[in-house]
Image (cartoon, rainbow, N blue to C red):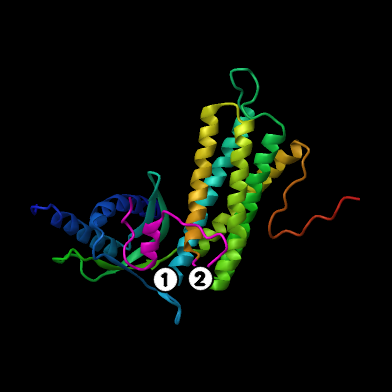
């Protein structure tokens, strides 16, 4: 280990990213908020330009792979959740909420 | 199985990279598969918004489950922790409206893949800001309707998580609005300049 301890960490990162590149491993880009790591973007590591250098520079290419499928998942989940919410509202005697994408119910006579 | 392995690999990845980039110097991410003529940053913004919306939706789902459970769970006094009544109905309605808004935002984003221009941002605002209002309503009704402090804390925790994700989307919107938020999510802003992601505090 170097005196400041940084080189082995970078070397590990280089090896790690190289391995990911070989196996088409997914890279999760996340932000940490209030102690929770929230994954935001998922991509596949495709290229590493310089894994280790004196300036500790690592440049890699990420191919973003998700998007449309996530949106379909959101739409399906919220549709199902709205059904459950509406069942409870109906039980309580309240009007149900309209589901997006469905025609508006005609007014009651 | 392959998907499970990918997920596990991705989870394992997150932590080491956190250490790797702790110095926050010189690491760069380049994003490919960008449509011709479209700046890379805009594409990343679109993907980030989708990811944050997915996170908000999954936490809203968890909040819904928890709220309905509170209605079915009896407290020490033998009555539901969140009994039938205006507070329960109001919380359900606000959660339902949040689902509507998340659903509409997702449907809209599907129509503008990888596009983060001014028009996209303006349209998205019309769903994002009302979600924040519904979260505030849930918070207010929870204080009056949920009798158990731990349960209230749990619901408020969900609200905080959803709000964080929604504000993250809000932070991606660069057009000037009358009530622009100042967010503490600088790492995301850094990401969107195409430099580093893991400089988080």
- For the residues bearing labels 1 and 2, Cβ distance under 8 angstroms: yes
Residue nearest the observer in this picture, B137 or B89: B137
Q: Chain of mark 1?
A: B
* Residue located 55% across and 67% down the image: B121
- Residue B188 image position (x, y, % from top left): 39, 59
Is residue B182 rendered magenta in the image?
yes
Mark 1 closeness class: few <14, some 14–19, many ≥20 residues within 10 Å: some
Kindly state the secondary structure of the residue where label 1 is placed.
helix
* Residue located 52% across and 73% down the image: B117
Indicate left or right for A30 with B97 as reference.
Answer: left
Name, please, the residue furthest toward the top.
B77
- Residue A99 image position (x, y, % from top left): 70, 54
Which residue has dot 1 on it? B41
Which residue has dot 2 on it? B116
Residue nearest the observer in this picture, A46 or A23: A46
- Residue B84 image position (x, y, % from top left): 70, 31
Tell me, yes or no, if residue B110 can be seen here: no
Q: Chain of mark 2?
A: B
Q: Magenta part of the protein: which range?
A: B174-201
- Residue B155 is drawn in which quadrant? top right
């Amino acid at each position: 280990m170097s005196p400041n301890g940084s080189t082995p960490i970078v070397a590990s990162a280089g090896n790690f990213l190289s391995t990911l590149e070989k196996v088409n491993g997914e890279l999760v880009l996340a932000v940490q908020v209030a102690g929770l790591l929230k994954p935001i973007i998922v991509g596949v590591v495709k290229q590493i330009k310089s894994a280790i250098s004196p300036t500790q520079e690592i440049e890699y290419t990420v191919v973003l792979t998700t998007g449309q499928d996530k949106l379909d998942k959101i739409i399906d989940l919220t549709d199902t959740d709205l059904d459950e919410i509406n069942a409870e509202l109906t039980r309580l005697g309240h009007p149900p909420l309209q589901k997006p994408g469905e025609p508006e119910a005609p007014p009651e006579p | 199985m392959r998907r499970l392995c990918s997920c596990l690999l991705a989870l394992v990845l997150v932590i080491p990279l956190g250490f790797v980039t702790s110095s926050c110097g010189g690491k760069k991410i380049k994003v490919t598969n960008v449509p011709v003529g479209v700046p890379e940053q805009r594409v990343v913004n679109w993907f980030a918004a989708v990811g944050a919306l997915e996170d908000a939706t999954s936490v809203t789902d968890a909040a819904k489950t928890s709220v309905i459970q509170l209605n079915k769970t009896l407290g020490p006094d033998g009555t539901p922790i969140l009994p039938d009544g205006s507070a329960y109905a109001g919380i359900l309605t606000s959660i339902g409206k949040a689902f509507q808004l998340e659903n509409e935002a997702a449907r809209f984003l599907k129509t503008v893949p990888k596009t983060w221009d001014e028009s996209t941002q303006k349209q998205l605002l019309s769903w994002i800001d009302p979600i924040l209002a519904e979260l505030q309503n849930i918070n207010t009704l929870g204080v009056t309707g949920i009798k158990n402090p731990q349960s209230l804390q749990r619901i408020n925790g969900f609200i905080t998580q959803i709000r964080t994700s929604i504000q993250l989307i809000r932070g991606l919107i660069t057009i000037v609005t009358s009530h622009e938020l100042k967010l503490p999510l600088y790492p995301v802003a850094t990401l969107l300049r195409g430099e580093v992601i893991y400089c988080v505090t």
